[in-house]
Amino acid sequence: MTGKEIEMAKDSPPRAYVAQCIDLFEGGEKTVTLKGRGQAIAKVVNVAEVVKRRVKGLCQISSIESLYEARKGEADQKKYTAGMKITLSLDQLDKSAPGYQDPVPEEEVQEEDKARREPSSTKKPKKGGKSGGGRGRGAGKGAAAAGKGGKAGGGRGSGGRGGGRGASATGATGGRGNAR
């Protein structure tokens, strides 16, 4: 079982690995092995499942590995690491091997349209997080930002999860009335 091996990192985007696998199979490669350790194991499984549903006739053999590796800077200390290896092949694999899976039925395979593939250089920033732009908890410190007693437009009712109950510039109460 020769072929290309792809080692996956936990923080790389899965679609890049999916595209790489599909390109290898379309380029004439018969066997591709996906490997990952630790937190990248889930990514190995996800990428393999997507690729199997994009390339017809792929057999699969999965295996779990465990190894001890020396910790950085500490030669006498070793750390246990779990790993996973999934071999995808257009050639028939050993059906009696542990972890063997038959190809996905052809009616479930939807071949990839390369024109729809998103180029990685034009990624849109994610909403939320530290870059802003998402649905946060308001605009900041509220009245404290404008000085004592004043509203800076960031208090309750101005955005995020504030509830939207503040009075508008025209004095309307949003149909709720002033009585509580």
Image (cartoon, helix red, strand yellow):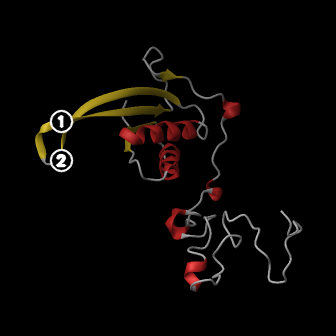
Q: What is the tally of numbered marks visible in this picture? A: 2
Q: List the residue tagged with mark 1.
A: 78
Q: Position of residue 33 (x, y in %)?
A: 41, 37
Q: Position of residue 120 (x, y in %)?
A: 52, 62
Question: Marks 1 and 2, how far apart in space?
Answer: 9 Å
For disc 2, the neighbor class at 10 Å (few under 14, some 14 to 19, many from 20) is few
- Under circle 2, the secondary element is loop
The N terminus is located in which quarter? top left
Horizontal side of residue 82 vs 13, given as left or right = left
Pick the front one: 51 or 68 = 68
Q: What residue occupies the far top of the structure in this picture?
A: 96
When asked about the image quadrant of residue 159, the answer is: bottom right
Q: What amino acid is at disc 2?
A: Lys
Q: What amino acid is at disc 1?
A: Lys
- Can residue 129 be seen by looking at this rendering? yes
Q: Position of residue 30 (x, y in %)?
A: 46, 36
For disc 1, the neighbor class at 10 Å (few under 14, some 14 to 19, many from 20) is few
Q: Which mark is residue 54?
A: none
Pick the front one: 98 or 105 = 98
The C terminus is located in which quarter? bottom right
Q: What residue occupies the far left of the structure in this picture?
A: 76
Instruction: Tell which circle, 1 or 2, labels the residue nearer the N-terminal end.
Output: 2
Horizontal side of residue 48 vs 161, given as left or right = left
- Can residue 37 be seen by looking at this rendering? no
Pick the front one: 147 or 114 = 147
- Under circle 1, the secondary element is strand
Q: Position of residue 15 (x, y in %)?
A: 53, 51
Q: Residue at x 65, y 36 (%)?
A: 109
Say above or below: 151 vs 32.
below
Q: What residue occupies the far front of the structure in this picture?
A: 179
Q: List the residue tagged with mark 2.
A: 72
